[in-house]
Image (cartoon, rainbow, N blue to C red):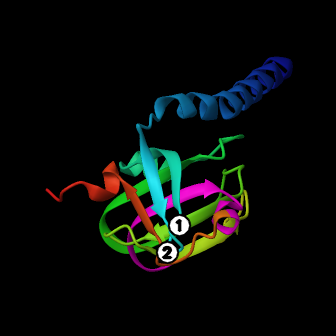
Amino acid sequence: MRDIVLLHAVKSAILALFFMVTLPAFGQEQIRFDREPLLIQTAAGKVLHFTVEIASTPDQRAYGLMFRKTMADDAGMIFDFDEPRRVTMWMENTILPLDMLFADDTGTIRHIKENATPYSRDIIDSMSKVKYVVELNAGIASKFGIKPGDRIVSATTTKKAK
């Protein structure tokens, strides 16, 4: 009888381990993101071109770029929070180091967090009310001289309020 109980416990542990490993993979498949072109207009006169995924639902915003192992240099994600508010984010389950551009409802960048640390639970604060956050590969802001006061422009940032 003891052997049967032990065997049952081992099977349960193996099954639990299986689900711990496979469920995140299934979760990754369930979240879909539309894409759109995004421009960053710098005060220095540069226009930078990116293609970003759009995180506009609560589930999309919660999932973001978690578990991604690579991202093209001209790719990223825009988070649309519907209404301006103070935003806090973190990097738990995010493998890629990122630059985060926090922008108000006009698309003007108000704050930048450069080189956010992968897997960190440290809170990253927008420092003021924002409507959008754009995540790009770490180092992009420095490489192209993106600074507060620059603007992001995309279909998401220019859509009319309902």
When the figure is inspected, residue 51 is found, relative to residue 39, above or below; the finding is: above
Of the numbered discs 2 and 1, the one sitting upstream in the chain is 2
Percent from the top left, x then y, of residue 106? 32, 70
- Measured in 3D between alpha carbons, the distance from the residue under mark 2 to the one under mark 1, in whole angstroms, is 15 Å
The residue at the point 68 percent across, 65 percent down is: 116
Residue 156 visible to the viewer: yes
Q: Are marks 2 and 1 in contact (CB under 8 Å)?
A: no
Q: Percent x, y for residue 5?
A: 78, 23
Image quarter for residue 25? top right
Q: How many marks?
A: 2
Residue 90 seen in the figure: no
Decide which of 158, 122 is in the foreground and name it.
Answer: 158
Please give left or right for residue 81 compared with residue 15 in the image. Answer: left
Q: Depth check: give the residue in front, 10 or 128.
A: 128
* Amino acid at pointer 2: Ala
Magenta region includes residue 139? yes
Judging from the image, what secondary structure is the residue with disc 2 in?
loop
| Image location of residue 53, percent across then percent down | 47, 43
Residue with the mark numbered 1: 101
Kindly identify which numbered label has been placed on residue 31: none
**Location of the C terminus (image quadrant):** bottom left
Residue 13 placement (x, y as % from top left): 75, 30
To which quarter of the image does residue 80 belong?
Answer: bottom left
Residue in front for this viewpoint, 5 or 107: 107
Residue in view at x 74 percent, y 31 percent: 17
In-image side of 10 versus 51 (left or right): right
Q: Residue at x 55, y 49 (%)?
A: 76
Q: Which residues are magenta?
A: 125-143
Task: From this view, report whether residue 149 is shown above or below residue 41.
Answer: below
Q: Which residue is mark 2?
A: 43
